[in-house]
Every structure is written in structure tokens, then in C-alpha cells.
Amino acid sequence: MTDMQPKKMIILDILNILRKHSDEDHRLSQQQIQNLIEKEYEMKVDRKTVRRNLSKLIEFGFPIKYRGCEYDSDDAITRNGKSGEETILTDWYYVHEFMNGELRLLIDNVLLTDGLFTTDRIDLIHRLEGLSSKYFHSEISKIDMDIYGKIKNKQIIMTLEEIGNAIATDSQVSFNYCDCGIDGEPHFRLDNHNNPKRYIVNPYQIISKNGHSYLICNLPQYDDLTHFRIDRIKECKKMDSPSKPLRMLKGFETGIRLSEYVKAHPNLWNGEPVHITFQCKKYMMNDIADSFGTDLRIEELPDGMMKVHVQASESSILHWALQFADAVEVLSPQSLREQIAETLRNALRKYES
């Protein structure tokens, strides 16, 4: 049983009612708001009180709309009153910050993010659900969490906070990094003395790719970008030392465009982007667009073939082309053709022996 609310709290009660029980598709009359206040807060209020507080909420800047208002698409309802035609203020609703489709997109990203306990996933999803009305359901109860893999790093949220703070304050971060061992567990990457190797990097941005989050950063001893998978970072600490400005790196004098970086590193393999040409069947276009985007130079060839020009690192194209070895032929650079040929010869020898 809810304790009786003081009268001065009525404006907050009305705000909570609108947030919870309304959206553009589920609107409330003043009578319905009265009934919900009585049901949830055990307080009886008259219609004038509801109307007065609704007006105050609008004056205070809360995103509350009603039928026929400036930003509502429905026509206002009018009636003949003592002083002529007057508008009936009804169909009140709260304009939530996120559309339901946007929330579902965010929830999908939570589900696909490595490094979260199942309980943490569910908690985050419930909090995202709370950003809409009660009518939004992510159907979390119907999701089999086991399909999203076992959790390897329970400190991912702290890692993200530490990196986020460092990026915001232009500071370096230090951390240990793990590789997956043959036992399926993370193992520290070691230095020359067989101790856990400590990295110090200049952090710039965090991106999401193929269900994983990556830190885009720079190792101080080099003048290019590299990346580390967030769920493999351990014991991350923001440092007092300032990070190297991005504009000091070769090729990034005007900043970084994440879309360009991801296209140049489709599977997030390291390496400097170079001009690469390959030919393939036209039916490969969906796979090409998924990996490199659509801002490409493509030449149509006979027999349903096409020639594609991309800017990408050789290491990323090497692994990408091997996935589609029977459908893709890299034409240039020659060094990459030779790497692919040698890799395929080595693979063939293993299967022929």
C-alpha cells in the first residue's frame, strides 16, 4: 500500500503518470489521469487541479502534448461554451526521448555486446525499457541469453567508464591485454620478461563492429592508429599524462572519420590503408557493402563480373578474400596477390598430405 502523498507532490505524480502510462499511441484524458492518481497514489484530485498542473508542466518545459496542440497531428476537439467555441484539452501524452524502434536498436546492441553478465544485460534492458511507457515491451523474457555466449570479462563497464573519462579529459590510459588460450579462457599477453605486458595508449574513440566494442587508439611510439577489443582489456586505468592529439598522427591532421576507418579495416585487422582492386561476381555486392560500405568505385565487367576499388589494409583484405576464395580474385597490389596465393598453397598442402 502506497503512503499518502502530500498535495504539493501532485505535479510530480502527474508527471510520473504520463511517463508511465502514455505515449503518442496511448493518450490519457484528464479523467483517466485523475483515476490513475487515485489508484497509484491514493489521492483524490479534481479536474481543475489536474488541468492546472498539466499547464505548469508544459510551462516548465516538459515534453507533454495534447490533442490539437502545435506539434500534434490530430485536430483539436471543440464545443460551444458560454463565451463561444472553446477547445477541449484532452488526449494528453508524454513525448519520450526515444522512439520504440530506437530503444529496440539499443537493446539489440546490449544483447550483442561481449563482456556483460546475463544479469547485467537484463538490468540494462529493463532500464532502457523504463525510457518509454509501460506499453513498450522488449520481450526480454522470450530471449535465450545463452545464445549470446559466456561472459569472459565482468569488468567491461568499469573499463568503458575509465576509457570514456580518459577520452573526455585528453588523458592516456594503461591496461593489460588478454588473448584467448586453448582452454577458452583469457590469458595475459606477456612482455619479454614473461610478466603481463602493460600497454600505455592515447585513446580517441570507441566503436562497435561485428558484435564487439573496440578502442581506437595510438601507441605513443608509433604515428598511426591501432585498436584493442574492449572485453579483452584488463585493469584499465586513466593516467595523469596527457594523450597525444589526434592531429599529430600521420593522415589524421583533420580528425578521424570512423566510417572511413571501419571501411579500411573491415574485420578490424591492423595495417595502413592502401588502394586495393579485386574482381568478383555481382552477387557479392551485399557482402561487399556489409564490409566496405557503398561509397566505392565499381566497374561492370562482362559475364556478370565486376571490378571493385577500395582503400583498405592488406591484412584485412587478405582474411576477407580468403573467406570468399572461390568468388573473389584480388588483382592488385601484387604483394597481396602473392600473400593470398602462398596462403592458399599452404592450405592445399595440408589437405593433400
Image (cartoon, grey):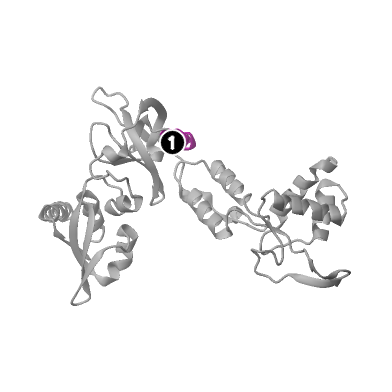
Residue at figure coordinates x 53%, y 52% from the top left: 107
Amino acid type of the residue that numbered disc 1 sits on in the rendered structure: Ala
Query: Is 69 displayed left or right of 203 in the figure?
Result: right
Residue 10 vertical placement versus 25 (above, below): above
Residue at figure coordinates x 30%, y 48% from the top left: 268
Residue at figure coordinates x 32%, y 30% from the top left: 199
Main SS type for the magenta part? Answer: helix
The furthest residue to the front? 83
The furthest residue to the bottom? 303
In the rendered image, which quarter is residue 310 located in?
bottom left
Residue 340's x, y, as percent?
Answer: 16, 54
Residue 45's x, y, as percent?
Answer: 87, 51
Examine the rendering and report whether any part of residue 190 can be seen. yes
Q: Which residue is mark 1?
A: 168
Residue 252 forms part of the magenta stretch: no
**Which residue range is magenta in the image?**
154-166
Counting the numbered discs, the total is 1
Residue 157 forms part of the magenta stretch: yes
Secondary structure under the numbered disc 1 in the rendered image: helix
> Which one is nearer the viewer's eye here, 136 or 68?
68
In the rendered image, which quarter is residue 302 located in?
bottom left
Query: Is 285 displayed left or right of 272 in the figure?
Result: right
Residue 43's x, y, as percent?
Answer: 86, 47
